[in-house]
Image (spheres, grey):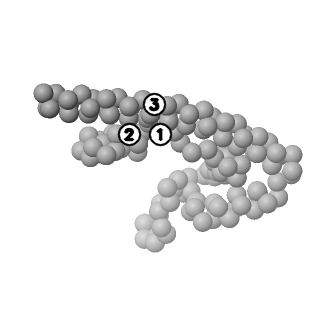
Amino acid sequence: TLQLFRILSTHFPLLPGLTDKPKRPLSAYNIFFKEERARLLAKMPANESEEGKDEPRTASGKIGFENLAKIIGGKWQDLKPSDVEYYKDKAASDMERYKQAMDEYNKKQASKNEDEEDSERSSKRQRAD
């Protein structure tokens, strides 16, 4: 998807700045979901496609998102409090990463805006002369 985004950004000038923005932090549940999804999909055998079967195609080719979400949601509900704390700690460290990345991003955007304003002022002065 990043390649597609880069291709689109060459054609649409509004898109280039969006790639610099840091990704939002994941919640404890999102981190658990991501890890558990990888574990479940690794355990499942790949579906052999049979002709004439009218099942919707899934991204992984193994299980649909609805069923996957139900299984993982149930596992999250049954998780021990110590395991929940583990994922909350991971989410907190991801939040710290995000805050630091956003500080850097905002500083870069502020300096970029100042540079644009300075160049705009100088071009107005040149036109006035």
Disc 1 marks which amino acid? Lys
Q: Are marks 1 and 3 in contact (CB under 8 Å)?
A: no
Question: Mark 1 and mark 2 in contact (Cβ < 8 Å)?
Answer: yes
* Quarter in which the N terminus is drawn: top left
Position of the C terminus by quadrant? top left
Residue tagged 3: 108
Identify which amino acid the numbered label 3 is placed on.
Lys
Query: Residue at point 35% right, 29% down?
Result: 115
Query: Which residue is disc 1 drawn over?
Result: 21
Percent across and percent down for residue 7 are 29, 41
Number of labels in the image equals: 3
> In the image, is residue 82 above or below residue 117?
below
The amino acid marked with disc number 2 is: Gly
Residue at image x 43%, y 71%? 52
Which residue is at a point 53% across and 42% down the rendered structure image? 23
Residue 17 location (% of width, % of height) = 38, 39
Which is in the foreground here, disc 1 or disc 3? Answer: 3
Q: CA distance from mark 1 to mark 3?
A: 10 Å
Q: Secondary structure at mark 2?
A: helix
Name, please, the residue furthest toward the front.
129
Query: Crowding near pointer 1: few (<14 within 10 Å), some, many (20+)?
Result: few
Q: Identify residue for label 2.
A: 17
Number of other residues with Cα within 10 Å of mark 2, as a class: few under 14, some 14 to 19, many 20 or more: few
Question: Is residue 48 shown to the viewer in this render?
Answer: no
